[in-house]
Image (spheres, rainbow, N blue to C red):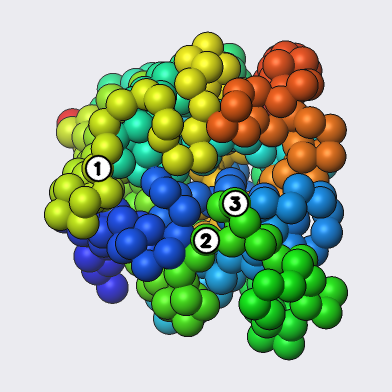
């Protein structure tokens, strides 16, 4: 199962809230999170790791980031 | 690029540096337990440009200019400058106004609440408790889906407006420097007595401001976020920075002879516990709903966030109202209309928090 959250343009703490809600809903699987600030990128990665999820990759495109998170 | 400042060690380092520099600024002339106070300093700037005429709190505080300009420099160097705007700006403005009013009922922003405690001012415990309660109320709104909506990417010029305004203020200050014994220099007002007359040398204030702006932008240091993340996510990342600030300021205050524990006679403070508490409930709720403490709003404004810039202007205008309308407290206690303003502010926050519930995924 793979889901995507578009948190671009949302201010703190919304990207983290959305990510954690989705992680709780999914339990495991693959989740992509789109953000557009460095702070949101760091916050989402930190939050996912605190739930035991892994940050598989972070790709940047024109100032936007896509975090690929996986949880087993 | 690995960002050291975003690590746990990094945020603790930043808190320690800010705490030390704040205590040092007091030693070098800033008012007692006010080495750095974003609310007080923005209020002093409002006074310096004549938005209010409270004679004891008028000074162009270079620390504030440094915060914004330092954050801008750090954002450019870190390839982190993101011009953006358009997330409910009018709401952010109003939250800024009432954040300032609440902070001035207490007499300090969250940074100063920590610095007051680090200097032994136990009244600050009521303010800190209020701050935490206000932020907690904010988290209840977040859990109900409160959201100010998305910002949009925009022109670089939009993100540069706030740094340019701050640079302009700095130029004004250089054009019209303080003249000894004169309450006015050119267009700017200067305090002859009171906290506005107490300040570290200009270049030191500016230098500290720049340094703090740089490291705080890189680390996302935020006093509101510290408590919000603890309540909402059980995360202590930002909180560790805040505690480091408190510890460092306390230690240096002891060394410099600036630690005087007690309730009565504390510098630029009053002893009305309930209103120290309630002022910060209002301020904390405003910071939570707007997504950042006053310092963080300055750093975000420096990295291109036009909505944070609007919040900052809201705070500066709010300072004008606070002093013109008798809402701000003084060492004697709350102002004649401060209590009414707190309740109006809380009502406004309830309205905003309950009605702005657009779904994030929409």
Disc 3 + disc 2, Cβ < 8 Å: yes
Disc number lying in front (1 or 3): 3
Instruction: Using the image, name the chain to which the residue with label 1 belongs.
Output: B
| Relative to B99, B5 lies left or right | left
From this view, report whether residue B137 is shown above or below residue B325: above
Q: Residues within 10 Å of mark 1 (few under 14, many from 20)?
A: many
Q: Residues within 10 Å of mark 2 (few under 14, many from 20)?
A: many
- Which numbered marker is on residue B205? none
Inter-mark Cα distance, 1 to 3: 20 Å
Q: Which residue lies furthest to the bottom in this view?
A: B175
Inter-mark Cα distance, 3 to 2: 7 Å
Task: Give whichever of discs 1 and 3 has the lower sequence position.
Answer: 3
Q: What residue do we see at 84% from left, 33% from top?
A: B325
Q: Can residue A14 be seen in this view?
A: no
Q: Where is residue B118 in the image (x, y as percent from the top left)?
A: 28, 40
Q: Quadrant of the C terminus of chain A?
A: top left
Helix, strand or loop at disc 3? loop
Task: Give whichever of discs 2 and 1 has the lower sequence position.
Answer: 2
Q: In which quarter of the image is the N terminus of chain A?
A: top left
Q: Mark 3 points at which residue?
A: B194
| Relative to B97, B280 lies left or right | left
Q: Name the residue under label 2.
A: B198
Query: Front-most of B100 and B24?
Result: B24
């Amino acid at each position: 199962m793979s889901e995507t959250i578009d948190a671009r343009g949302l201010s703190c703490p919304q990207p983290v809230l959305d990510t954690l809600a989705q992680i709780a809903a999914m339990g495991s699987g693959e989740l992509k999170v789109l953000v557009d600030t460095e702070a949101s990128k760091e916050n989402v990665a930190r939050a996912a790791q605190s739930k035991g999820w892994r940050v598989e990759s972070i790709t940047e495109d024109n100032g936007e980031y896509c975090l690929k998170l996986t949880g087993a | 690029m690995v960002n050291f400042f975003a690590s746990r060690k990094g945020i603790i380092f930043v808190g320690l540096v800010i705490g030390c520099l704040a205590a040092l600024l007091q030693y070098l002339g800033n008012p007692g337990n006010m080495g750095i106070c974003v609310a007080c300093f923005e209020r002093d700037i409002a006074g310096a440009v004549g938005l209010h005429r409270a004679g004891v709190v008028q000074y162009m505080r270079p620390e504030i200019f440094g915060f914004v300009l330092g954050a801008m420099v750090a954002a450019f160097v870190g390839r982190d400058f993101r011009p953006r705007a358009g997330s409910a700006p009018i709401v952010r403005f109003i939250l800024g106004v009432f954040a300032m009013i609440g902070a001035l009922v207490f007499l300090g922003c969250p940074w100063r609440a920590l610095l007051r405690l680090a200097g032994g001012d136990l009244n600050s415990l009521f303010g800190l408790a209020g701050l935490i309660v206000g932020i907690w109320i904010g988290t209840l709104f977040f859990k109900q889906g409160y959201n100010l909506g998305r910002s949009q990417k925009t022109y670089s010029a939009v993100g540069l407006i706030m740094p340019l305004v701050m640079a302009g203020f700095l130029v004004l200050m250089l054009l019209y420097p303080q003249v000894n014994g004169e309450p006015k220099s050119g267009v700017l007002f200067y305090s002859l007595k009171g906290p506005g007359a107490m300040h570290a040398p200009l270049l030191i204030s500016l230098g500290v401001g720049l340094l703090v702006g740089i490291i705080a932008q890189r680390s996302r240091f935020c006093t509101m976020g510290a408590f919000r993340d603890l309540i909402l996510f059980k995360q202590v990342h930002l909180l560790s920075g805040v505690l480091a600030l408190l510890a460092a300021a306390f230690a240096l205050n002891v060394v410099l002879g600036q630690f005087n524990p007690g309730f009565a006679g504390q510098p630029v403070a009053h002893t009305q516990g309930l209103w120290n508490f309630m002022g910060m409930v209002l301020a904390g709720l405003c910071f939570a709903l707007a997504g950042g403490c006053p310092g963080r709003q300055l750093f975000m404004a420096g990295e291109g966030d036009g909505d944070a810039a609007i919040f900052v202007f809201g705070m500066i205008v709010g300072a004008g109202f606070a002093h013109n309308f008798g809402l701000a407290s003084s060492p004697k206690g709350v102002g004649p209309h401060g209590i009414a303003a707190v309740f109006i502010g809380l009502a406004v926050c309830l309205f905003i928090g309950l009605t702005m519930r657009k779904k994030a995924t929409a």
